[in-house]
Amino acid sequence: MAGSRIRCCARGKRAQILNPGYFDLFRCGGHMPERDAWQSLCEAMQDGRRDVAALELAAIDATLRRRSRGEALPVDDLYPEEHRLAPYPEWGEAWNAYKGAVRAGAWASARRSLDELVRLLEAAP
């Protein structure tokens, strides 16, 4: 059951990355839209699906690009403990740094934190 949900999610992420207007995850009820991708990324890593985790990071990257272009996306962190979902403590630290930078509007710092998450994904066992 989890596998089919992950495949469906992966198709949605590909569609969002290629055409953000087609699959708009940014109607998210007031929380940071990256939250959904983060939760899916953590779930994919637990299931051993690095390919899906990479798509989730690409979706977070697409959201950061939208933010840096000035789009008004929610920055409310309604779930401050979600970093505990991370498969490794370093991931949680990088995620918290990313969220803090986004809330502060520090796009360069957010980019560094996201690049760290990409590096951690590439180095993951």
Image (spheres, rainbow, N blue to C red):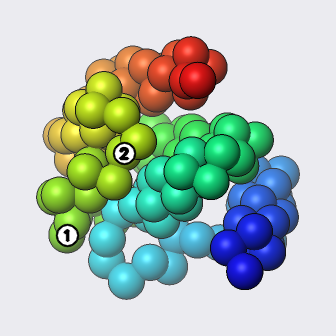
Q: Which of 69 and 102 is in front in this view?
A: 102
Observer able to see residue 15: yes
Q: Which residue is drawn at 31% across and 77% down?
A: 30
Viewer can see residue 23: no
Q: Mark 1 highlights which residue?
A: 78
Compared across the picture, whether 53 is left or right of 29 comes to right
| Numbered disc 1: secondary structure | loop
Residue 11: % across, % down: 83, 64
Q: Which residue is drawn at 36% across and 45% down?
A: 86
Above or below — where is 23 with respect to 42?
below
> Front-most of 118 and 98?
118
Check disc 2 and give the amino acid type: Ala
The kind of residue on which mark 1 rests is: Leu
Sort mark 1 into few (<14), some (14-19) or many (20+) by Cα contacts within 10 Å: few
Q: Earlier along the polypeptide chain: callout 2 or callout 1? A: 1
In percent of width and height, residue 26 lies at 52, 70
Image spot of residue 56 (x, y percent): 61, 49
* Above or below, comparing residue 42 to residue 104 in the picture: below
Badge 2 is on which residue?
A: 86
Quadrant assignment for the N terminus: bottom right
Residue 109 is drawn in which quadrant? top left
